[in-house]
Image (tube, grey):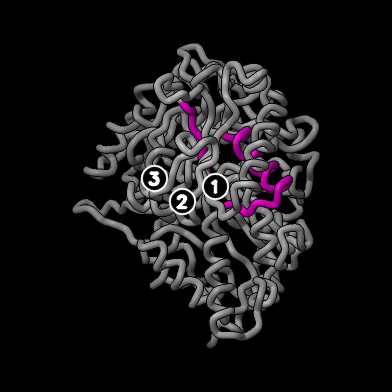
Amino acid sequence: MAPARWTGLIGAGLRTMLARRVALLSDQRHWAANSGRIQRAQLRGLLEHAARTEFGREHAFDKILNAPSADLVRAFRERVPIREALEFRDPFARMREHAEPDVTWPGVVRDWAQTSGTTAGDKFIPVSREMMRHNYHCSLDIFAHAARGGLPLSRLFSGRILFLGGSSDLTTNEHGVRTGDLSGLVTPLIRWPLSAVYLPGPKIALMSDWPAKIDAMARRCLDEDVRAVSGMASWSLVLFQRVLELAHERGDGARTLRDVWPNFELFIHGGVKYAPFEPRVREAWSGATDGADVPLRVEVYPASEAFVATQDRPGRLGAEPGLRLNVDREVYFEFVPLEEIGSHDARAFACDEVEKGQRYVVVLTTCAGLWRYVLGDVVEFDTIPPEGPTRLRIVGRHKHFINAFGENLIVEHIENAVAAAAAETGVRIGEFSAAPVYPDDGAGRRSGLELAIETEADSTLLARFADAFDRSLKSQNVDYTTKRTGDLGMAPPVLTALPPGAFHAWMASVGKLGGQHKCPRCANHREIIDGVVKISGVESGITGGGIGISS
């Protein structure tokens, strides 16, 4: 039977299946009162499941479990130290390369997500059967929250849903252990009837050449009734632009995404901060950067290690809501104050122990054999029990910052300042990154900050943009303001304008294009920004008198 004849039934079936979950997620008082208790139950279940593994025996999980219930978390923290990813390398190599069972998780873990870190080399993350189930249920919660927001699932699933995942191609070793992008590992979960609405299809999903893949996706989806798109905002914009180019080339009068996909209702995005891309999404959707937005957006916080959180309330530009922590899905979360991460006596707090206004590094214990694993994202909290469910916002990475001269800038500061400058000046932007400018007496160069940004704006607009960027940083960060006072400690920021696609060209040159790879928004070194400028063949703002313009 043709897929179109089943799509309405799929939505109705999903609505029925999720009815109880929608009701539970809507019970704010339940999560406000019980999130801490639920998390402790998740930890106990994980300890019980892995007690007989090598890791469980080495860390005396049996003794932790015999502790009084009130002391379970304390006993766990005393016996299991916080670990960075590199400290799991050796046991994970035994599990992945030799299919060794019962090391950090029971049995043989046959699926591994390969992810490229920006502060270290490739990482291999275990994806157990239980973690597959975790990702599946958290994905369903996206649609449950959308339904809570008023979107009828029967209507949504009457059309097609496009997923901009990485390559679904996997490698399998002689022991039958599979390794690849997480999206490739979870693709087998997309079975009938969901396969009846899934795009772009397995053939295109296997492609690893991202420019060719985006073009193939656009051509495949141009004449489909696309009602939802899931993907990073940066890559989704590339797809949207290619769809509009194809629509223009064939002369059918479509000027906006709303013309091409009139039934489009849901944009699921995550991985990068949305605000800098929001005006261009509006422009693609309605034809103007200050025009209508897509009907419904749901931000997600997925990682190869676990699906951390999902947006459960509507938001608007400048007031994006925190994302609700997935507290009941076989993952135990801890939060370490940013200033203490790496210390042997670092404190850790559960989701009902955190405070607003404090920055924390996320630490995970998962149903795939990660134990007090430093995820590395830095978060702040919008709501905490008992006032409501635990909701957080990502504000950076604990190894991604700029502090060459005591300015103490983090990813959130850079992203907010770029978004504010774009809004003030009307400059259309693409990808961007910032880095310190080191003084050079011979060249007459002073300490400062460089922002490299994809844009086609002229030098006059860019000068205004740089000024607005500087003012926004000052409004957010007292240390930066101090260093910039009187232009004594740091000179005004310099801006390097790059052609569209510059960052993707650089990412391709270092083997990090497409999938879940993200452009680092800042670094306390110049390797990234120098690499992008070099491959673009443009003049850096450092040498171009403050504003470097591509020719």
Disc sitting over residue 115 in the figure: 3
Q: Is residue 521 visible?
A: no
* Most distant residue in the bottom direction: 1
What percent of the width, then of the height, locates residue 272? 56, 46
Decide if residue 354 is on the left or right side of residue 535: right
Q: Is residue 382 visible?
A: yes
**Camera-nearest residue between 62 and 127:** 127
Q: Residue at x 44, y 55 (%)?
A: 515
Mark 2: secondary structure: loop
Q: Residue at x 57, y 60 (%)?
A: 237
What percent of the width, then of the height, locates residue 166? 43, 58
Q: What is the spatial separation of the Cα atoms under label 1 and label 3, in whole angstroms?
A: 13 Å
Q: Residue at x 62, y 45 (%)?
A: 462
**Disc 2 vs disc 3: Cβ atoms closer than 8 Å?**
yes
Decide if residue 85 is on the left or right side of residue 363: left
What percent of the width, then of the height, locates residue 162? 55, 68
**Disc 2 vs disc 1: Cβ atoms closer than 8 Å?**
yes
| Amino acid bearing label 2 | Gln
Q: Quadrant of residue 424?
A: top right
Mark 3: secondary structure: strand
**Camera-nearest residue between 324 and 483:** 483
Q: Eyeballing the image, is 213 above or below 260? A: above
| Amino acid bearing label 1 | Gly
- Magenta segment boundaries in residue numbering: 411-437
Q: What is the spatial separation of the Cα atoms under label 2 and label 3, in whole angstroms?
A: 8 Å
Q: Which residue is mark 1?
A: 271
